[in-house]
Amino acid sequence: MDTALAPSTLWDGIVASLVALLAVLALARVSLRLLRRVTSGRSGRDGPARSLQVLRAHILGPRERLVIVRYHDDELRLGVTPNGIRLLDRRAAAPEPPPPSDRSEVGVAEPRL
């Protein structure tokens, strides 16, 4: 009995492996694009960066922090420890002041010549 594979059988196996590899890579690419579309669309047009904003973080100890976060229209006070994150307080966020349109409105003196 001859145990050597015929050249055509060997090439058929290589081609079948390459086709399977290309199919898996194409499926992975489609899955990643779909995942990106689903996760960015969940928070609105601007993505998750606009809906979650860290306003302040205060260090309370070597591994403990008090973090103030704005999430949509709420300000959250969070206690962060190595054991987890705990919601301490939730309040309606104060509206953001509009950006000044003119230097004179913010009280900046004009330079003298």
Image (cartoon, rainbow, N blue to C red):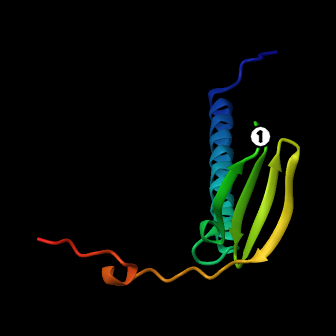
- The front one of 39 and 4 is 39
Q: Which residue is mark 1?
A: 61
The residue at the point 83 percent across, 41 percent down is: 82
Specify the quadrant of the image occupied by residue 91.
Answer: bottom right
- The front one of 77 and 16 is 77
Residue 43 in the figure: left or right of residue 78: left
Furthest toward the left, the residue is 113
Specify the quadrant of the image occupied by residue 18.
Answer: top right
Residue 26 in the figure: left or right of residue 89: left
The residue at the point 68 percent across, 32 percent down is: 9
- Residue 64 versus residue 93 in the image, above or below: above
The location of residue 99, given as percent across then percent down, is 45, 80
The residue at the point 62 percent across, 34 percent down is: 11
Residue 103 in the figure: left or right of residue 47: left
The location of residue 12, given as percent across then percent down, is 66, 38
Question: How many callouts does the rendering have?
Answer: 1
